[in-house]
Image (cartoon, rainbow, N blue to C red):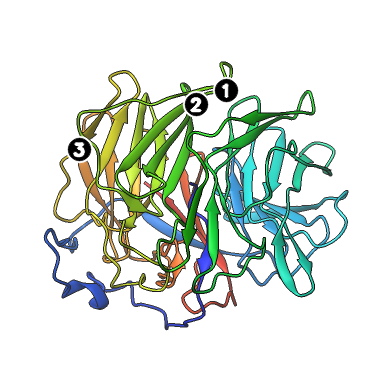
């Protein structure tokens, strides 16, 4: 699952990230507590406000080179796209056309030629109903086209969206028994482990076969949200998380060309968790952050707990490896992105971050001064992380559910 924003109604004040350690978490009783870094650290932060007349809270996406905001707040038809100049700390904007009605997608993926959008919803009789709509923007013509996956692909929320180099992949997601986007006690939720692919050059769809049978759960009793995450790799779609019945960790790799799943059986496996992140780099899949598997909606925030660890899975050896981490690495419920060969990691307990080098295995602390504020009741709390060239971009940070004076923050070594 790619980390997406999720909000609860509780509002909190901005946490002071100028402190070496966040007060709400320093005194917690944990088996392996972080020791926040207080000395000199690498890199610096720059704050760049949103383009004028846009309130913020808008989704952003990157193809690894260009970072784009989809400016739609509060609503839009087709939407304005803003592209970030990380060197000049400025924006350029352009208008798009071709979508009619409210553009309310919540999942995006950017390729060199296209911007894909999914997780649309309709509002019928005042209820939010998730749709099968898939929109694709041609970045050259600046025109959207709208299509739908095959009938086998049921409308849902929370499906991951990836670019493979030639097609877009939708995978996973959940739906309530009545199709509404309302989660209440005893609401029945069905979790999907299938998907669909779209080839923009040919304009054709294909199905991704289910990795496991559909799971059925009661919300607040056995809430399935955030159980599984996925990432695209050269070997196919890699998915890892809790099994549908939460009995153990589950791992599978889907070969799109062969239309088949493989189920590696490594000797060791990380502790199951929710809302974790999977990142690919140089034949390894890295597991970052996540709440413990016992997490349920409403008990996250500064006091939420997760494993303070870093694992990686070798696509060649088909085995997990747990990496040694320094005491200052704030990895519990963290988020990360790759800048070159360095994995930059930001957590919610320390102002400082950390970086892991895939080249030599060394760690280094990351500057906390000037870092964006936390939003403890948003997932992810540290904001949405993306990479544009040699810069890390953090977007959509709101400490109290509002986005006045919204900005993105740029980190560079």
Name which residue lies at 22% across and 70% down. Answer: 21
The vertical placement of 101 against 289, above or below, is below
Q: Can residue 340 be seen in this view?
A: no
Q: Answer few, some or many: residues within 10 Å of disc 1's Cα (few below 14, many 20 plus, some between 14 and 19).
A: some
Which one is closest to the eye, mark 3 or mark 1?
1
Quadrant housing residue 307? bottom left
* Badge 3 element: strand
Measure how far apart labels 1 and 2 are at the Cα level: 6 Å
Which residue is identified by label 2? 254
Coordinates of residue 291 in the picture (x, y in percent): 32, 58
**Mark identifier at residue 256:** 1
The mark total stands at 3
* Badge 2 element: strand
Measure how far apart labels 3 and 2 are at the Cα level: 24 Å
Which residue is identified by label 3? 322
Q: Answer few, some or many: residues within 10 Å of disc 3's Cα (few below 14, many 20 plus, some between 14 and 19).
A: some
Coordinates of residue 17 in the picture (x, y in percent): 33, 72
Asked whether the residues under the numbered discs 1 and 2 touch, taking CB atoms below 8 Å apart as contact, a structural biologist would say yes
Q: Earlier in the sequence, mark 3 or mark 1?
A: 1
Residue situated in front as seen by the camera: 12 or 410? 12
């Amino acid at each position: 699952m790619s980390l997406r924003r999720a909000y609860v109604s509780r509002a909190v004040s901005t946490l002071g990230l100028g402190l070496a350690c966040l007060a709400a978490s320093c005194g917690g009783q944990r088996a392996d507590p972080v020791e926040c870094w207080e000395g000199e650290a690498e890199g610096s932060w720059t704050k760049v406000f949103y383009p004028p007349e846009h309130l913020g809270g808008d989704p952003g996406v990157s193809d690894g080179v260009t970072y784009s905001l989809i400016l739609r707040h509060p609503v839009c038809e087709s939407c304005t796209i803003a592209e970030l100049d990380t060197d000049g700390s400025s924006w350029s904007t352009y208008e798009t056309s071709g979508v009619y009605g409210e553009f309310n997608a919540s999942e995006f993926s950017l390729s060199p030629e296209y911007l894909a959008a999914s997780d649309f919803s309709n509002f019928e009789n005042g209820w939010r109903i998730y749709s099968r709509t898939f929109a694709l923007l041609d970045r050259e013509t600046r025109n959207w086209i709208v299509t739908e996956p095959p009938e086998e692909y049921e409308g849902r929320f929370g499906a991951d969206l990836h670019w493979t180099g030639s097609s877009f992949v939708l995978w996973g997601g959940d739906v309530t028994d009545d199709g509404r986007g309302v989660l209440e006690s005893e609401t029945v939720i069905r979790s999907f482990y299938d998907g669909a692919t779209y080839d923009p050059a040919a304009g054709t769809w294909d199905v991704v076969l289910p990795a496991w049978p559909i799971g059925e759960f009661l919300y607040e009793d056995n809430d399935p949200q955030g159980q599984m995450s996925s990432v695209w790799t050269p070997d196919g779609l890699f998915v890892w998380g809790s099994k549908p019945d939460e009995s153990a960790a589950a791992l599978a790799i889907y070969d799109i060309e062969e239309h088949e799943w493989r189920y590696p059986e490594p000797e060791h496996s990380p502790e199951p968790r929710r809302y974790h992140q999977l990142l690919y780099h140089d034949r390894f899949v890295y597991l970052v952050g996540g709440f413990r598997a016992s997490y349920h909606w409403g008990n996250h925030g500064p006091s939420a707990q997760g494993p303070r660890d870093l694992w990686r899975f070798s696509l060649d050896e088909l085995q997990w490896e747990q990496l040694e981490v320094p005491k200052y690495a704030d990895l519990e419920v963290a988020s990360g992105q790759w800048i070159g060969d360095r994995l930059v990691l930001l957590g919610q307990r320390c102002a400082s971050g950390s970086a892991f080098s895939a080249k030599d295995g060394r760690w280094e602390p990351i500057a906390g001064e000037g870092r964006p504020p936390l939003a403890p009741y948003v997932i992810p709390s540290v904001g949405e992380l993306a990479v544009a060239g040699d810069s890390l971009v953090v977007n959509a940070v709101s400490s109290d559910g509002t986005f006045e004076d919204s900005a993105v923050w740029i980190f560079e070594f």
